[in-house]
Every structure is written in C-alpha cells, then in structure tokens.
C-alpha cells in the first residue's frame, strides 16, 4: 500500500502557484519524498525529491515539514501544460529492492 | 536520443495467446522495472531487475515473467494472456549504482487489450 495520502483532485488558475499537499506520517528516517507527475497517457515524469531540507529545481519547489510527516509540492507559476496527475511517493530510493509505490495521486487541473 | 523505447505501442490479443512486450534503454541504467496501470489507478510494479542477470517480483507478478540477459533489454512475457491483463504497461529504468537517488525514467507505454 502507498504510504502517502493526497487529495484526489485540485484546481489552479493559470499563472498562479499550485500547492499540492501530501501526508506521509509513517515516513522512516532513511526514506525520501519523491514527486512524479503523469500527463495524460504518457509515462510518469520525475519532478523533485528531498530528505528533510527544502529543495528547488527548474520545475518546482518541495517543502518538507520539520517533523517530515508532510510535504508540499509548489509549482510557482502553473501553466495549462502542468495539468496532470501528481504522485507523492516515499521510498528509501535505491534499486528495485525499494521500488516506488504509486498511489492514486492528485489530479491537478490548471484552468485558463 | 537517449531514453527508453517500448514495443509495440498497442496490441489487441486473443485470450490464451503468448505475448512479449519489449523494453530497451540506452542510458546504461542497471535497474529496470515493469509497471501496469489500470483505469483510475496508480501504477503497480510487476517485476524489477536490479542488474543484468537478476530479477525480482513486484506487487502483481502473477501471470508475468521477465528476463534480463543484458543491461539494455528487459522483456515482459505473458505466457497465456487473460482479459484481466488488459492494461497499459510502462517500462522504467534507473541508475541505482551508488547513492540513494532513485529517479526513474519511463517509457511511453504499451496499451494491451486481451479479448
């Protein structure tokens, strides 16, 4: 079973920040938080990952709470092309022995 | 262009037939994976391979087999297809040598319909 809880769907206005929450209250100390997204019919795409510090890359920012029991993925200026299902995953993150477990994710709809 | 290719793109198959889905990556990643995705559900891991010559079972391995004769190829075989195996199949790879980074790169998927 997935170790994360995400809202099933969210809407966001184009150009605004999209904040996608994720609860992972049973996360272990050696588990990372990963975010992937899946645009309609395509294979999932890696976005970002983190352990306990906040992370930022060209796609998004990841904010992890100090107790690591929840996190938020931030798309700073959402566009229509960001409409997708976003998956929050916790994993030790090394090889098939610790595979990624995809839940149902959050369906983000960016609205013009 | 580096990446993962899958073949065929889609296939309609009669129940009871044998089918092999092909997956090839050119990134020299040591780990490879097969997932299935059913309508309204997330991806579920079928089988994985940490390195050439080794394979392991994922969450839903029954009815499927895999082999990993070399680094680049990871075929998935349905020995006798059943309608419940109708799904979209994604192959992925990752470089798990050293560190704990686990970005997986996914192929475009194979849409399989078993009648």
Image (tube, grey):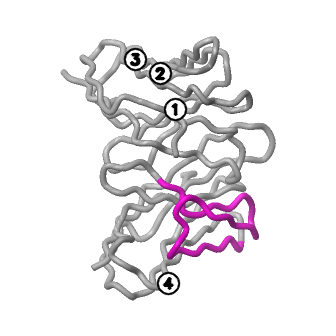
State which chain disc 3 sits on: A
Query: Are tags 3 and 2 found on a single chain?
Result: yes
State which chain disc 1 sits on: A
Q: Quadrant of residue B112?
A: bottom left
Q: Residue at x 44, y 21 (%)?
A: A21
Q: Quadrant of residue B88?
A: bottom left
Image position of B83 with respect to B6: above or below: below
What secondary structure is marked by label 1?
Answer: strand
Percent coordinates x, y for residue A111 in the rendering: 21, 23
Q: List the single residue furthest toward the right.
A: B98
Query: Are tags 1 and 4 found on a single chain?
Result: no
Q: Residues within 10 Å of mark 3 (few under 14, many from 20)?
A: many
Residue on which the image places disc 4: B79
Percent coordinates x, y for residue A97 in the rendering: 70, 52
Q: Nearer the viewer, residue B46 or A62?
A: B46
* Label annotation for residue A73: 2
User: Which of the marked residues, 3 or 2, is nearer the chain's N terminus?
Assistant: 3
* Label annotation for residue A44: none
Picture quarter with the C terminus of chain B:
bottom left
Question: Was residue B50 drawn as part of the magenta stretch in this picture?
Answer: yes
Percent coordinates x, y for residue B99 in the rendering: 78, 37
Q: Nearer the viewer, residue B109 or B26?
A: B109
Q: Are the two marked residues, 2 and 1, in contact with CB atoms closer than 8 angstroms?
A: yes
Image position of B84 with respect to A61: above or below: below
Residue on which the image places disc 1: A35
Residue bounds of the magenta highlight: B44-69
Q: Are the two marked residues, 3 and 2, in contact with CB atoms closer than 8 angstroms?
A: yes
State which chain disc 4 sits on: B
Q: Nearer the viewer, residue B101 or B27?
A: B101
């Amino acid at each position: 079973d997935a170790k994360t809880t995400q809202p099933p769907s969210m809407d966001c206005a184009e150009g605004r920040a999209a904040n996608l929450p994720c609860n992972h209250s049973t996360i272990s100390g050696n588990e990372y938080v990963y975010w992937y997204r899946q645009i309609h019919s395509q294979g999932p795409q890696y976005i970002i990952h983190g352990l306990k510090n906040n992370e930022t890359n060209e796609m998004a920012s990841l904010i992890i709470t100090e107790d690591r029991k929840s996190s938020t993925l931030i798309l700073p200026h959402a566009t229509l092309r960001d409409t997708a299902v976003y998956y929050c995953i916790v994993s030790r993150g090394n090889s098939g022995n610790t595979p990624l477990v995809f839940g149902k994710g959050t369906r983000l709809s960016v609205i013009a | 262009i580096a990446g993962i290719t899958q073949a065929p793109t889609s296939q309609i198959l009669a129940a009871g037939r044998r089918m092999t889905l092909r997956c090839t990556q050119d990134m020299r990643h040591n780990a490879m994976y097969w997932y299935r995705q059913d309508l309204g559900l997330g991806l579920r891991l079928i089988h994985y391979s940490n390195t050439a010559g080794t394979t392991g079972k994922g969450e839903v391995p029954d009815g499927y087999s895999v082999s990993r004769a070399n680094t680049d190829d990871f075929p998935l075989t349905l020995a006798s297809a059943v309608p419940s195996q109708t799904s979209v199949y994604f192959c992925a790879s990752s470089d798990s040598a050293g560190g704990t980074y686990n970005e997986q790169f996914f192929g475009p998927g194979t849409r399989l319909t078993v009648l």
